[in-house]
Image: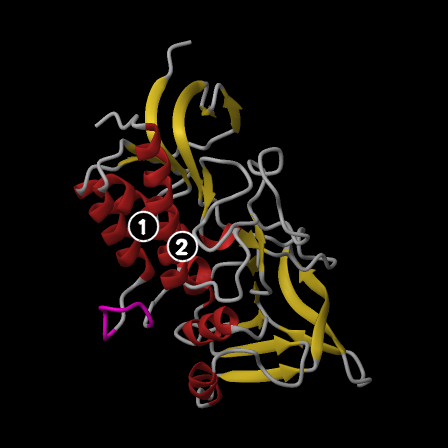
Amino acid sequence: MTREHIDIAIIGGGPAGLAAALYAARGRAKTVVFERGLPGGQIVTTDWVENYPGFPKGISGSDLGELMTAQAEEHGAIIRTFSPVEGVRTEGGKFVLTSEGEEFEAHSVILATGAIPRKLGIPGEAEFTGRGVSWCATCDGALFKDKTVAVIGGGDAAVEEAMFLTKFATRVHLIHRRDELRATKCIQERCFANDKIEMELSRVPAQIVGEGGKVAAIRLESTIGEPDKLLPLDGVFIFVGVHPVNELAKELCELSDSGYISIDHDGRTSVPGLFAAGDVTQSELKQVITAAAKGASAAFEALRYVDAANVCTI
């Protein structure tokens, strides 16, 4: 099988992957991004990004993803959309990627596969997914115009999505297991000022109840010994953290106890020539800006690795 030769292959087209592509392509390396869907990653499902430098009034997540993609392509990166990578292996000091029946040979690989939303694992969650249960307010919020919904979680993502849902829903119940939210204070302030949002603190979801094939209520248990509570509603949006998409890395490099790819400060993994960046790596702050910064660092080190071998094909 004839293989296409790549200097730096980037798996994942979110902010980390696109920033890495920009830096790698500007370094005159033949750079190819393999993205299983459309580029942009999780930011394309975010209604509004107001904390990315350079946009004082904010920017929609989809627009930011498009701009990042266009910038990487402008500098020569090749973005392969709807091109999932099924496997990566080492061979002769290089990496061989398999995607849709084709093989690609890369001198260096950057894993930027991101993370996926964590599920609750409670009765009704799987049964009513797509019928009232969602992990994307931007995608599905408009379906709940003039209805009542719940948001599960207490971090930045949950609170921001709860505020976004008030554009459509008449009432948004914000459910969090602790007695106070974990979100950034300025975000909390705007949340508490929104009279469409009702707090359900010190509560955990125990069951999503359906009727007529769709969500009808959620049963909440108390973490402080109060009686259970049944909330009638039409939709449940879940934002309780993420799982790293680490399948490709499991047989290649070291992972942390929680499944994230272990890297050093510059994005190096335990395997020479293999780098990682973004939400698939361990970090406390998972934001667009930190993902992009990690992508840039990984690309810089990947360029040094490729240049040291004097093998750039451009």
Q: Position of residue 2 (x, y in %)?
A: 37, 11
Which residues are drawn in magenta? 51-57
Q: Where is residue 240 in the image (x, y as percent from the top left)?
A: 60, 65
Q: In this view, does 43 lie to the left or right of 91?
A: left
Is 238 a magenta residue? no
Residue at 23%, 75% (x, y): give it: 56
Residue 119 image point, x, y percent: 64, 56
Q: Can residue 152 be seen in this view?
A: yes
Q: In this view, does 183 lie above or below 301?
A: below
Left or right position of 182 against 102: right
Give me the residue at 57% from left, 72% from top: 150
Q: Is disc 1 in contact with disc 2, using a CB cutoff of under 8 Å?
A: yes
Residue, far top: 1
Quarter holding the N terminus is top left
Q: Which amino acid does label 1 sit on?
A: Ala
Residue 158, horizontal then vertical, whole percent: 52, 71
Residue at 58% x, 34% y is 252
Q: As displayed, is residue 69 above or below residue 46?
A: above
Q: Which of marks 1 and 2 is nearer the N terminus?
A: 1
Q: What residue type is labelled 2?
A: Lys
Give the residue drawn at x 62%, y 46%.
255
In depth, the one of 90 and 57 nearer the eye is: 90
Compared with residue 303, is residue 236 higher up or lower down, i.e. above or below?
Answer: below
From the image, tell me which residue sits under label 2. Answer: 294
Find the distance from the CA under tag 1 to the CA under tag 2: 8 Å
Which of discs 1 and 2 lies nearer the camera? The answer is 2
Is residue 14 in sight in this rendering?
A: no
